[in-house]
Image (cartoon, rainbow, N blue to C red):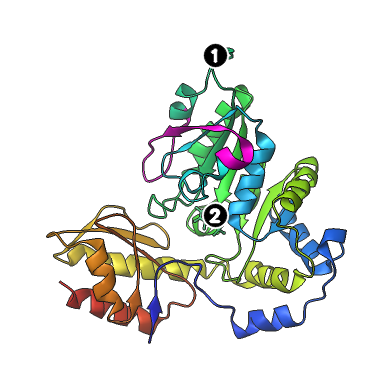
Amino acid sequence: MLIDLRSDTVTKPSKEMLEAMFNAEVGDDVFGEDPTINALELKAANLFGMESALYCPSGTQTNQIGIKLHTRPGDEVICESTSHVYRFEGGGISFNSGSSIRLINGEYGKIMASQIEAEINPDDIHTPRTSLVSLENTTNKGGGSCYDFKEIEAIAQVCKSNNLKLHLDGARLFNALVETNETPKDYGNVFDSISICLSKGLGAPVGSLLLGSKDFIKEGKRYRKLMGGAMRQAGFLAAAGIYALDNNLDRLKEDHKKAKQLETVLEKLDYVKMVFPVSTNICIFELKHGLTSKDFVKRISEKGIKVIAFGPQLIRLVTHLDFTDEMLDQTINTLKDIS
Ligand SMILES: *Cc1c(COP(=O)(O)O)cnc(C)c1O
């Protein structure tokens, strides 16, 4: 039994999802004629109470299109120093948007309204024009942490009073939503744009959605084309997204429960120091006694478990819908055996 905990992107479509894909009605989406993509975009827009949505191949692309549309070259984007848009999108903000980036060191990948306010440049010809704040929820590098929605509302207020746009990298937003009391519409209310991934915890093989106003998405379609992301009969893939939104949201709680169970075991292990509290489906821990993450990744992979190094001593495990109870037991036993 091979156990893959490197990411929640490793899931494969279930039989039922494949069935939905197989039966999809498709057309050429560049002509706007793919009924399944149109249905997915409409469904997502309605879910978030936003005007429009755009289906893209990846979350990198939805984030990059969002940031591009909210900025002009020479502007400045405020984000947390470990955020995906800055660290893991190949330098996309500078490449695609020509914007500079103002980093804030947050807690578990989250930043506060007061910190943002202090980093907004004055209206002065010497300074880059601050035009966008980009948040991440849940945070990836921050260990799957969720924002308190009150803080998000305070941030939205700061953005409004300073004429800044607010973007959300919500690759794992649904993981936050099942742990908190907010609805997608609450998020749709406060953000100018939201990116969500269908190919992470939701289990679709491909796809992300960018949400925003009608005009914003119309312009987004232009950049999706420019970036090479306009697809043709991709309704087969969009059908997986519709299936995921209909069936795989509530079950994210199961992934969180398993991550918590892993945390409980890890906390008691001699060679582990928990540095991030587990709040959703991500478990990040530090290795002690000079054990390097490179050695650990190798030793655990020899026992059939794949994990990734998140730093010289840091390991990340991500639970997901293909991680069964049986796999959880085996992982727990293996973690106990390694020392
Ligand atoms: C996975 C992820 C993305 C998007 O990644 P793609 O692989 O391009 O779909 C964006 N933000 C965060 C926080 C992520 O974890």
First in sequence: mark 2 vs mark 1 = 1
Q: Which quadrant of the rendered structure holds the C terminus?
A: bottom left
Q: Which numbered disc, 2 or 1, marks the residue closer to the eye? A: 1
Q: Which residue is mark 1?
A: 126
- How far apart, in angstroms, are the residues tagged by discs 2 and 1? 37 Å
Asked if the residue under mark 1 is in contact with the one under mark 2, i.e. CB atoms within 8 Å, the reply is no
The percent coordinates of residue 58 (x first, y second) are 61, 59
The percent coordinates of residue 277 (x first, y second) are 32, 54
Crowd tier of the residue under label 2, counting other residues whose Cα lies within 10 Å: few below 14, some 14–19, many 20 or above = many
Secondary structure category for the residue under label 1: loop
The dot on residue 287 is none
Q: Which residue is mark 2?
A: 173
Residue 76 vertical placement versus 300 (above, below): above
- Queried on whether the Cβ of the residue with tag 1 lies below 8 angstroms from ligand 1, the answer reads no
The verdict on residue 101 being magenta is: yes
Q: Nearer the viewer, residue 51 or 61?
A: 61
Crowd tier of the residue under label 1, counting other residues whose Cα lies within 10 Å: few below 14, some 14–19, many 20 or above = few
Q: Which residues are magenta?
A: 94-113
The percent coordinates of residue 289 (x first, y second) are 12, 60
Residue 317 vertical placement versus 277 (above, below): below
Residue 334 vertical placement versus 194 (above, below): below
Residue lying at 40% horizontally and 51% vertically, measured from the top left: 141
Q: Which quadrant of the rendered structure holds the N terminus?
A: bottom left
Secondary structure category for the residue under label 2: helix
